Image (tube, grey):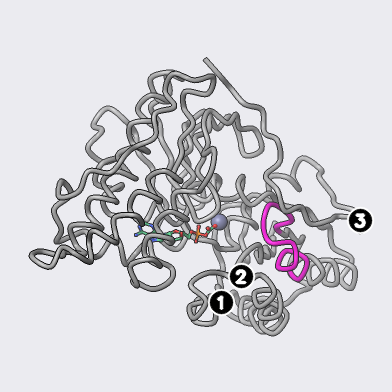
Amino acid sequence: MIVLGIESSCDECAVSLVADGRTILSSVINSQIVHHRPYDGVVPELASRLHVETITEVYQQSLKEAGLRLDQVDAIGVTNRPGLVGSLLVGMSFAKGLAFASNKPLVGVDHILAHLYAPQLEAPVDYPHVGLLVSGGHTLFALVHGFDNIEVVGTTIDDAVGEAFDKVAKYYGLGYPGGKAVDDRAKTGNPDAYRFPQSRLDKGNHPFDVSYSGLKTAVINQKEQFLQDVTNPNLEDLCASFQKAAIDLLVRKLKAVVKHTGVSRVVAGGGVAANSYLREALLQQRTWEISYPSLELCTDNAAMVAGWAYHALLRGDRAGWDLNAESRVPRFKRRYP
Ligand code: KG4
Ligand code: ZN
């Protein structure tokens, strides 16, 4: 079964063709980063307008790279939640138009479940496993039982970890998106130069939750002092210290989640999973079975959407023309100790 996947939940416009939920025939991604960079963040109105401009070309390119025509495609999967509603609607309208005109089945795809599915496109990972989803919009620790069955074990109570990286980068003039810039700077910095706070939610009702707003504010507040520190102002040290605080918190919680669930098979995804310090820290957990998708599958793409849709189609899911966009994360079942 060949599924055409469409992803437009944020600032990436992507179309992919995947066979049998596994083999990527093409994966075209149009990034809007250069357009949003002057604003230091994604401008929702601009994102939707750019999706309108590019989606047809991305679709045509994807078919071309796969060497296929639309009549050789069996079904269409499209991200319908969560994300920027205006952006989601562009991909969804396009998907509905294709499905209607070609009389093919359509399914709506949850972006979070698709991210957690992404590693399966490279090497099958057995269920259950612990999923760590860390991006500009999400920070999630989940027990993944199947492609559509996850239990959220912990999440952020405020900012997503990628958002903290982006805000820190913005404040220190490192550009947008800031995660990679911070990661690169941190490589030559001293991670112990500054002491930044880590959230302590370990003893509350949701002991696997995290918080990033305090850390973000502390790093931003450091700027005054940083500017006065004429003897040794060092952005590399600042990045390394922030990164250590942000990532150590993820790793500490992840260890607690593994211990609590008894599941040591761990899958990491989302843009922040590209972080070199995080990758290194996870690889040091010798007793864990770590699965990392390649960078292209960590960040937003449509292959994960087509791959996930295949399984939904197999069990008979079909979306109606009333399929709508949802901005929020659905209420996944939570699991507490
Ligand atoms: O998954 P993604 O492409 O989009 C969504 O947010 O869904 O993730 C983008 C996020 C941004 O916040 C970006 O700064 C962050 O991933 N990121 C990184 C790195 N590369 C990208 N954060 C830390 N270190 C990196 N190397
Ligand atoms: Zn994403």
Mark 3 Cα within 10 Å, few/some/many (few <14, many 20+)?
A: few
Extent of the magenta region? 79-91
Image spot of residue 18 (x, y percent) = 61, 61
Label 1 sits on a secondary structure element that is strand
Image spot of residue 189 (x, y percent) = 15, 58
- How far is the residue under mark 1 from the one under mark 3? 27 Å
Tell which of 175 and 60 is nearer to you. Answer: 175
Quarter of the image with the N terminus in it? bottom right
Label 3 sits on a secondary structure element that is loop
- The answer to whether mark 2 and mark 1 are in CB contact below 8 A is yes
Mark 2 Cα within 10 Å, few/some/many (few <14, many 20+)?
A: many
Q: At x 49% / y 81%, what residue is drawn?
A: 38
**For residue 220, what is the image quadrant?**
bottom left
- The tag earlier along the polypeptide, 1 or 3, is 1
Q: Is residue 216 left or right of residue 2?
A: left
Tell which of 202 and 81 is nearer to you. Answer: 202
- The answer to whether mark 1 and mark 3 are in CB contact below 8 A is no
- How far is the residue under mark 2 from the one under mark 1? 6 Å
Q: Residue placed farthest to the top in the image?
A: 337
- Residue 104 inside the magenta-drawn segment: no
- The tag earlier along the polypeptide, 2 or 1, is 2
Reading the image, the residue beneath label 1 is 30
- How far is the residue under mark 2 from the one under mark 3? 22 Å
Tag of residue 322 = 3
Label 1 amino acid? Asn
- Residue 88 inside the magenta-drawn segment: yes
Label 2 amino acid? Ala
Quadrant containing ligand 2 reads bottom right
**For residue 322, what is the image quadrant?**
bottom right
Q: At x 45% / y 63%, what residue is drawn?
A: 296
Tag of residue 14 = 2
